[in-house]
Image (spheres, grey):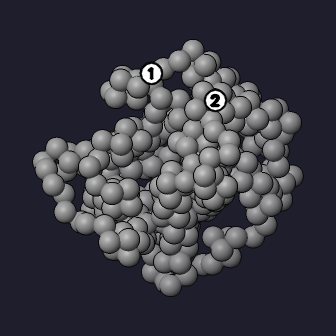
Amino acid sequence: MTSVTLVDDPHARRALPLLLLGAVLIGFSPVFAKLSPLEPTITAFYRAGLAWPILMAVALLHARAPAAGHRKARPTTWRDHLMLAVPGIAFSGDLACWHWALQYTSVANSTVLANLAPVFVTFGAWALFGHRPTPVFLAGLVTAVAGVALLVADSLTVGAPGQITGDGLGVVTAMFYGAYILGIGWCRTRFPTAVVMAWSTLHTAWILLALSLLNGESLAIPTVSALAILLGLAWLSHAGGQGAIAFALAHLPPAFGSVSLLLQPAVAALLGWLILSEPLTPTQTAGGVVILAGIVIARRGSAHQTVGARRATPSDTVP
């Protein structure tokens, strides 16, 4: 048994603000997606596709530097490529299921269910890597998820046509995003952040492109303003937000990282009020406060987290 004390880890102290910054930047993505005149899946493709050249350029620049420790500057084997494909495939599944869920259930329902991801991350981190959650952390997790539910409580629906399908897809969205968070953390033990983001984004992009073409969606970007929206989604939310999260997850427990990302829907609600003139009710404000309280509680529960003997992973055994 080893004790991981986050408050004494300078990397963790720097990673937490970066993780919260990533959550804020991702909070812009629903606004950009709503402003986009393109179909949902092709919008998601451009989110990854337009971010990929920048991420790959950074990865190539990083490859010129000497490799740090046991991490590799670039994938060199099929096993490396398969490892980097895991978060990319998971993220494409997350985006695709999220957009399909919105076709069958309300935005509120899909938001609550998609933000169950920390539950799956906590279970996966415990089952796969031996990261046992503390009771205080679990209290923070429940509090933060309850805050998300409160955030969208005014819009929750029950019994709408096709709702079972949509709600089911919302749960699958959470499972995919949980797999993405765990996959990013796993890959960061083997590769630098820039390499993980570049290669996982490549896999996300080609899968979403294939789904878009199968759905008959057009690739045409109609106006300059539409291009600006897509670039904001790609460069700000994906390259900036997801990149910050990927770096932070190298220095924070995945379960705590996923709980902190519950700040995203609160940011999205605030931006919707500021940019899209969407109403911000007292209940939503209270939900945002509860989310922040849950993150603080989870942070305390993670400050002295005991991690059991971790099972061997490919990064431990492959030379």
Q: How many marks?
A: 2
Mark closest to the chain's N terminus, 2 or 1 = 2
- Residue type indicated by callout 2: Ala
What residue appears at the point 51 percent right and 69 percent down from the top-left corner?
89
Q: Is residue 276 visible?
A: yes
Q: Is residue 298 visible?
A: no
- Residue type indicated by callout 1: Pro
Inter-mark Cα distance, 2 to 1: 14 Å
Instruction: From the viewer's side, name the closer residue of 9 and 79.
Output: 79
Question: Residue 247 in the image: x percent, y percent?
Answer: 49, 49
**CB-based contact (under 8 Å), mark 2 and mark 1:** no
Q: Crowding at label 1, few (<14), some or many (≥20) Cα neighbours within 10 Å?
A: few
- Residue placed farthest to the left in the image? 224
Q: Tag 1's secondary structure?
A: loop
Looking at the rendering, which quadrant does residue 229 occupy? top left
Q: Can you identify the residue that label 2 sits on?
A: 153
**Up/down of 21 relative to 313, above or below:** above
What residue appears at the point 61 percent right and 42 percent down from the top-left corner?
109
**Up/down of 20 relative to 91, above or below:** above
What residue appears at the point 60 percent right and 52 percent down from the top-left corner?
161
Question: Residue 27 in the image: x percent, y percent?
Answer: 45, 37
Q: Can you identify the residue that label 1 sits on?
A: 279
